[in-house]
Image (tube, grey):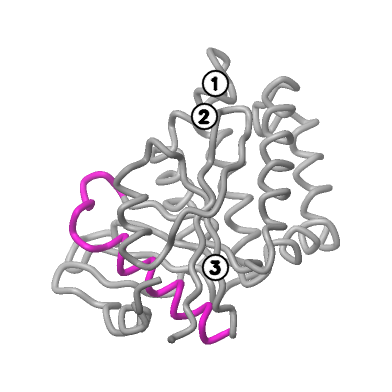
């Protein structure tokens, strides 16, 4: 692999004349959830078909999940806001994990899964059992891919609002996450990306990731990409 160690110092590009990257706060979670739904709309359509729940119900479900990630990994969750813009408009976000398997265990031990299940049964999330089945199958597939050793660290979710793309925000967020993982001695990092998401693949390749395998869920293929960020 090409020596790209100099680009992995993500703290060097945390700020820009138009935007800045900083650690997320609980107040950011509603905008993060909204950006997720906007960025991954094809996944929502696949899961629910023509029975898509009310947006408010979807937002609550997604926000609950990102709130869990923020509570358990507050130092591994970043957002980008537009400078000099009233209302602190969210431009993008990134969340990573040093150990995805441990994170799922925390979801169980911390009672998050039980609370999510209770909300599902009350109809708060607007899911039907068919959609829930697809979600569970996909999470199992994701968990299986997480066992791709020795790459326990993972880029969990990265999104940039359409209006703010091609401005270096995605790259700044990604390098911030890589720099954090390296400080935690997590040098071998993994992510999954859809094969048709060419802009994301190009970004990941430019930051040292290369394809290492393929996994599948109910929506189709995921490419497994890995990076060994130890400076050689």
Q: Is residue 24 above or below residue 184?
A: above
Q: Earlier in the sequence, mark 2 or mark 1?
A: 2
Using a 10 Å C-alpha cutoff, classify the residue at mark 3 as few (fewer than 14 neighbours), some (14 to 19) or many (20 or more). many
Q: Residue furthest left?
A: 17
Toward the viewer: 113 or 181?
181
Quadrant location, the N terminus: bottom left
- Where is residue 3? Give x, y as percent: 35, 79
Question: Which residue is labeled 3 in the image?
Answer: 189
Q: Nearer the viewer, mark 3 or mark 2?
A: 3
Residue contact between numbered discs 1 and 3, judged by CB atoms under 8 Å: no
Of circles 1 and 3, the one toward us is 3
Q: Quadrant of residue 8?
A: bottom left
User: Mark 2 = which residue?
Assistant: 44
Q: Tell me which residue sits at (67%, 37%) in the image.
A: 138
* Residue range corresponding to the magenta coloring: 161-184
- Tell me if mark 2 has few (under 14), some (14-19) or many (20+) residues whose alpha carbon lies within 10 angstroms of its own: some
Contact, mark 2 vs mark 1 (Cβ under 8 Å): yes
The CA distance from mark 1 to mark 3 is: 34 Å
Q: What element does badge 3 sit on? A: strand
Checking the image for residue 52, the label placed there is: 1
Mark 2, secondary structure of its residue: helix
- Closer to the chain start, of discs 1 and 3, is 1
Q: In terms of image quadrants, where is residue 146? A: bottom right
Answer yes or no: is residue 50 visible.
yes
From mark 3 to mark 2, how far is it between C-alphas?
27 Å
Image position of 191 with respect to 1: above or below: above
Residue located 44% across and 80% down the image: 179
Please give left or right for residue 108 compared with residue 65 in the image: right
Q: Is 99 inside the magenta-drawn segment?
A: no
In the foreground, 170 or 120? 170
């Amino acid at each position: 692999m090409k020596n790209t160690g100099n680009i992995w110092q993500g703290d060097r590009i945390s700020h820009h004349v138009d935007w800045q990257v900083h650690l997320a706060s609980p107040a950011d979670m509603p905008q993060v959830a909204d950006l997720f739904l906007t960025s991954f709309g094809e996944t929502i359509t696949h899961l629910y078909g023509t029975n898509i729940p009310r947006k408010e119900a979807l937002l609550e479900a997604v926000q609950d999940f990102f709130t869990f990630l923020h509570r358990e990994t507050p130092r591994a969750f970043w957002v980008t806001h537009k400078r000099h813009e009233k209302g602190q408009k969210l431009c993008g976000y990134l969340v990573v994990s040093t150990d995805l398997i441990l994170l799922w265990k925390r979801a169980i031990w911390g009672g998050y899964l039980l609370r999510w299940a209770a909300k599902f049964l009350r109809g708060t999330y607007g899911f039907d059992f068919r959609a829930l089945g697809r979600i569970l199958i996909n999470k199992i597939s994701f968990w299986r891919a997480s066992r791709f050793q020795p790459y326990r660290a993972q880029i969990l979710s990265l999104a940039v609002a359409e209006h703010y793309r091609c401005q270096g925000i995605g790259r700044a967020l990604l390098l911030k996450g890589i720099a954090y993982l390296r400080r935690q001695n997590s040098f071998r990092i993994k992510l999954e990306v859809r094969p048709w998401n060419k802009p994301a693949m190009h970004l990941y390749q430019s930051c040292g990731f290369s394809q290492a395998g393929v996994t599948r869920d109910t929506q189709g293929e995921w490419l497994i990409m890995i990076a060994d960020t130890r400076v050689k």
